[in-house]
Amino acid sequence: MVATQEQTVSEIAVENPFSIRVFETLGIDYCCGGKRSLSEACSRVGITTDHALALLSDAGRAANAPVTNGWANLSLSAIVADIVVRHHSYVRRETPRLEGLFEKVISRHGINHPEVGEIKQLFDAMSQELATHMLKEEQVLFPHIAHMEEARQQAAAAPTAFFGSVANPIANMAADHDDAGALLAKIRELTNNFTPPEGACPTFRALWQGLQEFESDLHRHVHLENNILFPRAITMERGN
């Protein structure tokens, strides 16, 4: 598989999961901003398309290695379980840890670095939205997807839901993802791409590193839902 500049970033990420590492290295959003063409995405981060294509070519060669557990081979229930166990748990575990680091950094360095307070407000807003978002998925959307898949496997009637088509809650979840992506982009901007200021203490550096890791996990989380789980669920509902 050879990436082209006309392909969207999400298409490339779905075709070749190895490309995700390239996008992360280049600072290209492959989940919430994945609908952009590679050319447009490169322009936004100030790199040449040729440079990105060269890196993606190497990732393409890696993609030719045997794949034993690709997402396309997993059931929707298995994908849902991985999202909850790996990514939802990560958000719930990391959020209070990062909040504690924010408090320490603000108390010690808030006067000289007022931007940390603004970043904390953005992070708090995102965390609150994610908490509600994940509950909606775990209590409503994900069980429905699992029941829908079970009915299909048993050649039974598809389950009905108060929200109508599965596309309706999926659209709401995707909108939440866009909101979280916008907040993350602002956080990245205010942290100067998560670069600690000169002379930053270990706690300051740990906070910036933690935010960068949080962004990376959330990008993978959203990619798995937006570009793999949700499209497959909609296709299944349609009987295809």
Image (tube, rainbow, N blue to C red):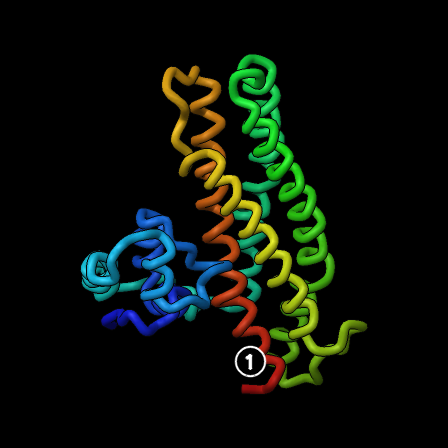
Horizontal side of 171 relative to 22 (left or right) equals: right
Q: Which residue is drawn at 37% across and 49% down?
A: 27
Q: Mark 1 sits on what residue?
A: 235
Q: Residue at x 21, y 57 (%)?
A: 51
For residue 116, what is the image quadrant? top right
Q: Is residue 149 above or below residue 122?
A: below
- Residue 145 at x, y percent in the picture: 64, 69
Q: Is residue 45 above or below residue 149?
A: above
Q: Residue at x 61, y 54 (%)?
A: 179
Q: Find numbered disc 1 in the image and state the secondary structure of the residue it sits on.
A: helix
In the picture as drawn, the residue positioned furthest to the top comes out as: 108
Residue type, numbered disc 1: Thr
For residue 140, what is the image quadrant? bottom right
In the picture as drawn, the residue positioned furthest to the right comes out as: 162
Q: Can residue 152 be seen in this view?
A: yes
Q: Is residue 65 visible?
A: no
- Residue 57 at x, y percent in the picture: 20, 63
Q: In this view, does 236 lie above or below 74?
A: below
Q: Residue at x 55, y 19 (%)?
A: 105
- Residue 168 at x, y percent in the picture: 69, 72
